[in-house]
Image (tube, rainbow, N blue to C red):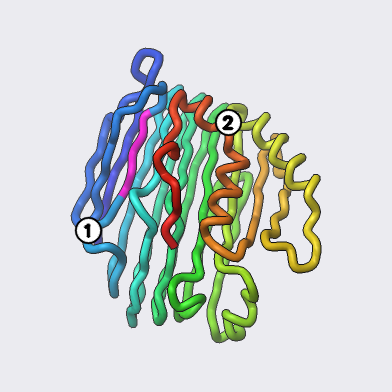
Amino acid sequence: MARGQLAFRRSGTGTAVETAFAESPLRFLTPRNHGTAAWAYTSTLGGGLVDGDRLELDVSVGPGARAFVASQGPTRVFRSARGATSTTIARVEADGALMLFPDPTACFGGARYSQTTEVRISPGSSLALWEVLSAGRERWGFTRCETTLRVLPFLDERWLLDPEHGPLVERMGRFGAIGTLLLVGPLFAGLALATRERVDAGPAHRGAPLVESASPLRDGALVVRAAAPSVQQLVQRFRDHLAVLPSVLGDNPWRLDASVAA
């Protein structure tokens, strides 16, 4: 079991990292940037999750604070009998904003993995997040993968991919990555509207390389679900939807990232 805690608070016109505590093999990087938001990157020693690993991350964003949380690289889950689990619980206080963009998860052949992300948001707070699952090197060769995304009262969903329900390679077809993009709150209201219009303007056709749907939620929130032949294509599409994010942050966290690892 490895636990981590990140806490962000408003400091003047910007945001400061108040707490950054991590137990091995979890660790954090908190680089400086030119904007008013605070950034934090998570990583794990050893290159991935092995049998029995359990990660728990607690994120707290104080009133009026803005936090960008990502990962230093993809989450790799190796073959295991008992499986590995990862849980992220986040809280965003009034007028705060959390941007949660971990790199894709890739499950190797024979892997078992369970992931839960739960975000509790206060009135007036905002949230932007994505979750992306890659087919991995063995192309959907894992034993079981389940993910739960809960942001009440906006979204509560669970994905389960298990070969017992049918061969995954056949079921997933040409797609090598699937993902969800969620936009909630006043800070991302305009972005949610523009994203919905962009997705609706490009209806899917048979054999399209990338397919996506945009579903409006309560209070102007939006969820986008997408599938693409490669993880690079899917992440790039989500970044295209988030093209205004650097102006929100005051800096571009992806300016030096030319590629996305599978």
Residue ID for mark 1: 45
Tell me, yes or no, if residue 63 can be seen here: no
Between 73 and 37, which is closer to the camera in this rendering? 73
Residue 106's image quarter? bottom left
Amino acid marked by disc 1: Leu
Question: Which residue appears at 36% of the width and 13% of the height?
Answer: 12
Q: Quadrant of the C terminus?
A: bottom left
Find the residue positioned furthest to the front.
258
The mark that comes first in sequence, 2 or 1, is: 1
Tell me, yes or no, if residue 186 can be seen here: yes
User: How many circles with numbers are drawn on the protein?
Assistant: 2
Cα separation, mark 2 vs mark 1, equals: 33 Å
Query: How far across and how far down the image is residue 37, in percent?
Result: 41, 26
Q: Looking at the image, do the residues carrying marks 2 and 1 touch, with CB atoms under 8 Å apart?
A: no
Secondary structure under tag 1 reads loop
Residue 178's image quarter? bottom right
Q: Provide the residue span drawn in magenta.
A: 38-42
Assess disc 1: are there few (<14), some (14-19) or many (≥20) residues with their C-alpha within 10 Å of its C-alpha.
few
Question: Please, what is the dominant secondary structure of the magenta stretch?
Answer: strand
Is residue 44 left or right of 167 when viewed as pictured? left
Question: Which residue appears at 40% of the width and 51% of the height?
Answer: 88
